[in-house]
Image (cartoon, rainbow, N blue to C red):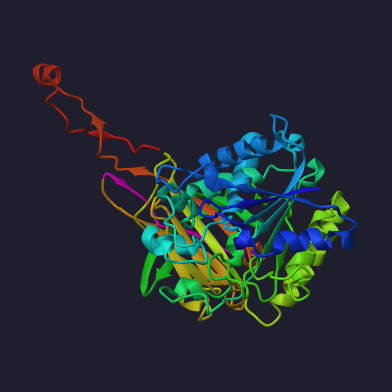
Amino acid sequence: MLVIFVHGWSVTDTSTYGRLPEALAKQANKYNLDIEVKHIWLGRYISFYDDISISDVARAFNSALIDLSGDDAITDFSCITHSTGGPVVREWLNRFYGASNLSQSPLRHLVMLAPANHGSSLAALGKKRLGRINAWFSGIEPGQRILDWLSLGSQQQIDLAESFLEYKSAASNFYPYVLTGQTIDKKLYDFVNSYLVEAGSDGVVRVAGANLNYSMIKLVETKDVETVLRGSEEIQVNILDQNGELKRPPFVPLGIIPGASHSGDTKGIMRSVVSLKSKKKPQVDEILKCLTINSKQDYINRGKELMDLTTKTQQRSHRYMMLVFVIKDDQGYPVTDFELFLLGGDSHSPDQLSKGFFIDRQQNSTHRNHLVYYIDYDVITRNKLTGFRVIAHPSEGFVFYHAVEYNSHSVDINSLLKPNETFYVEVTLRRRIDKNMFGFDNATDPKLRKEGLIFKSETRHDFK
């Protein structure tokens, strides 16, 4: 079995993976595997220039595969990635094969270690500050387009997530996995930012940001109107209704490795493997077990084993999730000026949610209509999330929006939420045009009508 380790653009030797490659090769015989390890150095193909994008890196990866095979026919292989390498290989797979040609792909197993599949909260810190965080970029400033992809709620992440919905992975003899940690190695950081010690993360990537199990739902504004309380004030809201089915991708096994952080030679999910025997590093065995899978049923069973591992690892800790809101109107315009309220209890009030549910909120810097909430799943489901309300601006004028609300009258929202996952919510508002914006006039003065000087209308129409 050919196993390829993908090394990032700032890496010049195998030290970032510790002795993980050698340990896998040494212990492979326990699982009747014969592993040949190869390395791809993306730094030889791309750089950290601002104009380099994730899709460029994916094309560079394809060139590296061709060079490795010696001709245009890329032989079957399994791949182990870390951090940004996960999205890179997923982008490569989608670009060159996609859902329709997945069975033609030579990639058999994809084991992603701490992948930033749904971005990283640290991306908001900017290039220079990220370059100083050795746990991620090893002292190298990332390029701006790479950083844009990694920013929470980026459109590129959403596009790739939507493409993955159509994959039939196991049926195409493709077996992806996510192995990540949620331990903070306090010796590794200088505490320049609270995100470095964020609960439910490995110091760089949240479990919910790594997990390839997620949900996507689309909601549209209806004509149904309700009167609700905003503080002591009564306001009217149009009700949001689900457009189409809630969508989820094919199941991808997730395993949370106990005691694992993003990087470092003490707790890092890769680099802390410093011995070929590595008896205290369960990630070695878990990776090897993933590489043995060659059937749909075995893949399902492997998923159950990793689910048990995750439950055991999290038995004494809270679980978290991300809500990604995308607000736009029915004419395709992004709505960037809005207030969003999460609602709880039977009264659908922001004041009825359990205290302590809120961890973080980020607005995507490139797409200002994308808003990401990071919440404590175990706390928010205790008193139940029963809806959310969007008050967009302007609320009056020539072009305006009505307040909208999605509540639990028609669906139990809590039943849609999953721990350790990301939930994408696309909200489409009706873009309203004031009826005085344009009209027709029954002009009686032929001269004025001919010269186009009459604009006042007696008959006005509301644009639908």
Q: Quadrant of the C terminus?
A: top left
- Which segment is the magenta one? 398-413
Of the pair 155 and 446, the residue shown nearer to us: 155
Q: Image quadrant of residue 18?
A: bottom right
Q: Position of residue 404 (x, y in %)?
A: 45, 57
Q: Is residue 402 magenta?
A: yes
At a point 75% along the width and 39% down the height, the residue shown is 106
Asked whether residue 205 is drawn in magenta, I would say no
Residue 71: in sight, yes or no?
yes
In the rendered image of this protein, does residue 408 appear above or below residue 212?
below
Q: Is residue 442 above or below residue 406?
A: above
Looking at this view, name the residue that lies furthest to the front: 13
Task: Report the side of 20 relative to 375 (left or right).
Answer: right
Percent of width and height locating residue 217: 59, 52
Relative depth, front residue between 268 and 402: 268
Viewer-closest of 374 and 219: 374
> In this orientation, which residue lies closer to the viewer: 73 or 425?
73
